[in-house]
Every structure is written in structure tokens, then in C-alpha cells.
């Protein structure tokens, strides 16, 4: 189910599990550091910046270039401000072999590596490949416990990443409905997609790979919560929110919604609940597109915007957040509550703290609703 969630943060930045796309042939390196078996990857062919881990320990360590003019000399670091004190001095490549020495204090150990073929993402590096990441990603645990929302019981599912790989900051919660409606099995499959599956293709695996390639830490982090905000015999409303760091200048924060039809099992497009002209879409996202596609909402009409703003929570005098129409956000998401549709503006990192969820009561929403939207409203009465 990744309609909100992490994808909002990446694509603007959720949406279903994101496929890695076309793969290119590349290689990672396996061999020994002294007597220790290790696996290594390098970000590009011309330098030795990358990462490695001891196969028995599975703790990723970065390999950084202290001098761009000496691409065969690298230093170890667990993050940019946590150096191990060790350096690698490598000989020029000899086809499919790398040799050199590891230095730490008065200790010197030989490095012997052999190339291993690996498929890498089209626009990624070998450090983002399944071959390099799979041992690090394996071993996360998902636990289940019973929970209740508004009188309806369900199963809460919580994933915790493997501590031995430094991925214990990967924590994702989702849930599963008790299967009583025809579409509940399909809904549960969609909800389960948020839970990391131990592969580099899952968004959590991609985040770990991106962070190793571009971040200040070895593995980054992901905190995500997929929770119900409405459960009825017909509808399931979901909030998908959290934060992540996958490399770059700053963390990502996200919040969004999804709505499922429990009869059909499909995610519905809340944009279809509103009359023509009430919502604005991005270029290429015409109002006539198939309803099966969830259309990104660029903005609200002036009248609908005023109606939403009229229910904006009051803030204290001097609050820097102001009102939503002055934010310059990256569109809107719409969810479903029993009291009315809920709106949240997609805000950039610097003002994400100003995010508000605003429920527009059905009586105030009715003038903007399409026939489909009024049917949804009537089904909740």
C-alpha cells in the first residue's frame, strides 16, 4: 500500500513497494581481511569509496576517500563523524582481483578480494544490490498483537530491523483486518506491503542502500506507522506517517492517507468524491483519468480551500506556521473519517512541523461532493 507514506517523502519524495526497475550487470567483492571473511562494494569503478562488512558480524562500515587524488587509499568510518582509525591501501586492480593492506595503529593485515557478479539498479551502485544488502537485511522480526479501533478488533503487526546490522532503527507498524468482508484478504495484502521483507527491492532495503551510498551513517533509519482512522463494514481509512533518513541533506517526514473498499479489496481514489473543478491536478493528471488510478492532487479550488481553512486548528498568537494557503506545499492528500473527508497538505521538510490534518464535516463538504462522494457520505450515516 504505499500511496502515502515513504513515497510522499521521496517523490515530492508512498505508494506500494517500489520496484527497482531495470538492472545492470555489476560486481561486488568477497574475500578476506587478514583471516576474516568480508564482503565489499564500491560506489563506482574508478575509486574505492564504498562499504564492507565482516560476514560473521554483518556491521556495515563505510570506506571513504580522504583524498580525491589518491583513489586507492580509503579510511574506515561508521559515519562521517565516527572513524574507526583504520585505513586501506590498495594496489591497482588486476582484472577481477583487489589486493592491499589494512592498517590500524601498529597492525597491518592483508586484503584479498575477488569479484563476484551482481545485478545492480540501473541508476544505482553495487552497494544497493541484492547481493551486497541481502545478508544485512535478513533477520528482521515481525510480531503480532491484538488491538481495537472504534469497537472493531484487528491485528497490529510490528517490524523491527536486525540489530546486528545497525538496522534496528528500521521500525514499521501496519495491521491486518479480521477477514469478514469479500475484499479483506486483498486489503490485508496491501497493508502488509509496508512491512520490510528483507530484500533490497523493498523500500526499506532501498533506503539502506541509498544511505550507505549517500548518507552520513551506514544504514539510515525508517520509522513508519500504518494505522486505521476508520473501520466500517464497507470502508477502511488508513493514515500512513513517519520519518526516514536515506542519505542526503536532511531526513524525510511524511503523512498521508489511503482508503480501501472492503467489498472489492481495492484502494479507491478520494478525488472521485468531488465535483469537477473542486480539485486541481498536476499536468498530465486529467480529471477524466481512470478511477483505478489515484491521482495526485495539486491543490483545492478557492471555495473548497476556504471551507477547509475555516476548520483549520487555531494556533497561538505569534505561531510561525500561519495558514495553509501560505505554505506553498506539494499538493494534498484526502482520507476518510466517519465525520467527513480529512485533508492534509504535503509540506516540505523545512515546515513539515506545520502539518495539520483537517476534517471537513459532511455538511460543509456536501456542496463539493460528486454523486459518488455523496454515496460515500450516505454510507456512513
Image (cartoon, rainbow, N blue to C red):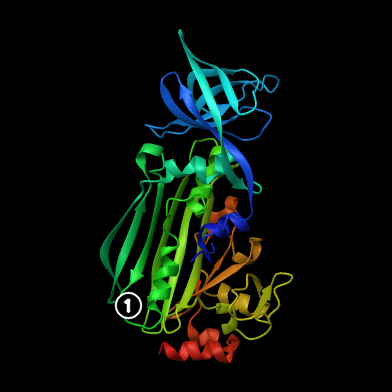
Mark 1, residue position: 179
On the picture, is 298 further left or further right than 333? right
- State the residue lying farthest toward the right: 283
Residue 340 position within the rendered picture, expressed as x and y whole percent measured from the top left: 47, 80
Where's the C terminus, which quadrant? bottom left
Q: Residue at x 42, y 74 (%)?
A: 187
- Residue 247 appears in the rendering: no
User: In the rendered image, which quarter is residue 137 located in?
Assistant: top left
- Relative to 32, is 5 above or below? below
Q: Nearer the viewer, residue 331 or 171?
A: 171
Q: Nearer the viewer, residue 40 or 286?
A: 40
- Relative to 36, is 272 above or below? below
Residue 65 position within the rendered picture, expressed as x and y whole percent measured from the top left: 62, 24
Residue 254 position within the rendered picture, expressed as x and y whole percent measured from the top left: 52, 58
- Residue 55 appears in the rendering: yes
- State the residue lying farthest toward the left: 146
Q: Residue at x 30, y 75 (%)?
A: 178
Q: Residue at x 41, y 44 (%)?
A: 169
Element carrying mark 1:
loop
Residue 116 position within the rendered picture, expressed as x and y whole percent measured from the top left: 55, 36
Label tally: 1
Amino acid at each position: 500500500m504505499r500511496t502515502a507514506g515513504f513515497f510522499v517523502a521521496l517523490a515530492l519524495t508512498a505508494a506500494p513497494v517500489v520496484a527497482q526497475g531495470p538492472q545492470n550487470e555489476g560486481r561486488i567483492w568477497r574475500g578476506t581481511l587478514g583471516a576474516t571473511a568480508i564482503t565489499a562494494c564500491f560506489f563506482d569503478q574508478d575509486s574505492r569509496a564504498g562499504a564492507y562488512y565482516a560476514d560473521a558480524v554483518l556491521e556495515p562500515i563505510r570506506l571513504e576517500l580522504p583524498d580525491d587524488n589518491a583513489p586507492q587509499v580509503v579510511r574506515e568510518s561508521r559515519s562521517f563523524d565516527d572513524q574507526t582509525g583504520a585505513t586501506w591501501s590498495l594496489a591497482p586492480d588486476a582484472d577481477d582481483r583487489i589486493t592491499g593492506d589494512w592498517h590500524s595503529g601498529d597492525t597491518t593485515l592483508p586484503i584479498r578480494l575477488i569479484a563476484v557478479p551482481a545485478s545492480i539498479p540501473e541508476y544505482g551502485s553495487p552497494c544497493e544490490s541484492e547481493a551486497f544488502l541481502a545478508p544485512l537485511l535478513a533477520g528482521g522480526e515481525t510480531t503480532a498483537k491484538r488491538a481495537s479501533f472504534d469497537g472493531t478488533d484487528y491485528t497490529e503487526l510490528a517490524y523491527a530491523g536486525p540489530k546486528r546490522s545497525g538496522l534496528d532503527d528500521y521500525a514499521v507498524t501496519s495491521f491486518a483486518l479480521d477477514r469478514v468482508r469479500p475484499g479483506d484478504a486483498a486489503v490485508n495484502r496491501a497493508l502488509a506491503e509496508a512491512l520490510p521483507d528483507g530484500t533490497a527491492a523493498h523500500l526499506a532495503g532501498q533506503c539502506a542502500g541509498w544511505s550507505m551510498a549517500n548518507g552520513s551513517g551506514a544504514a539510515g533509519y525508517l520509522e513508519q506507522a500504518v494505522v486505521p482512522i476508520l473501520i466500517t463494514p464497507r470502508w477502511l481509512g488508513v493514515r500512513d506517517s513517519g520519518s526516514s533518513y536515506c542519505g542526503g541533506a536532511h531526513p524525510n517526514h511524511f503523512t498521508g492517507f489511503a482508503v480501501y473498499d472492503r467489498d472489492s479489496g481495492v484502494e479507491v481514489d478520494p478525488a472521485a468524491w468531488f465535483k469537477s473543478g473542486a480539485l486541481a491536478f498536476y499536468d498530465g493528471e486529467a480529471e477524466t483519468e481512470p478511477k483505478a488510478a489515484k491521482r495526485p492532487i495539486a491543490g483545492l479550488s478557492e471555495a473548497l480551500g476556504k471551507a477547509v481553512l475555516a476548520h483549520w486548528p487555531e494556533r497561538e498568537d505569534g505561531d510561525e506556521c500561519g495558514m495553509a494557503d501560505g505554505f506553498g506545499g506539494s499538493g494534498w492528500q484526502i482520507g476518510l473519517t466517519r465525520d467527513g473527508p480529512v485533508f492534509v497538505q504535503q509540506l516540505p521538510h523545512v515546515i513539515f512541523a506545520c502539518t495539520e490534518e483537517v476534517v471537513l464535516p459532511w455538511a460543509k463538504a456536501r456542496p463539493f461532493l460528486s454523486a459518488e462522494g455523496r454515496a460515500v457520505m450516505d454510507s456512513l450515516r
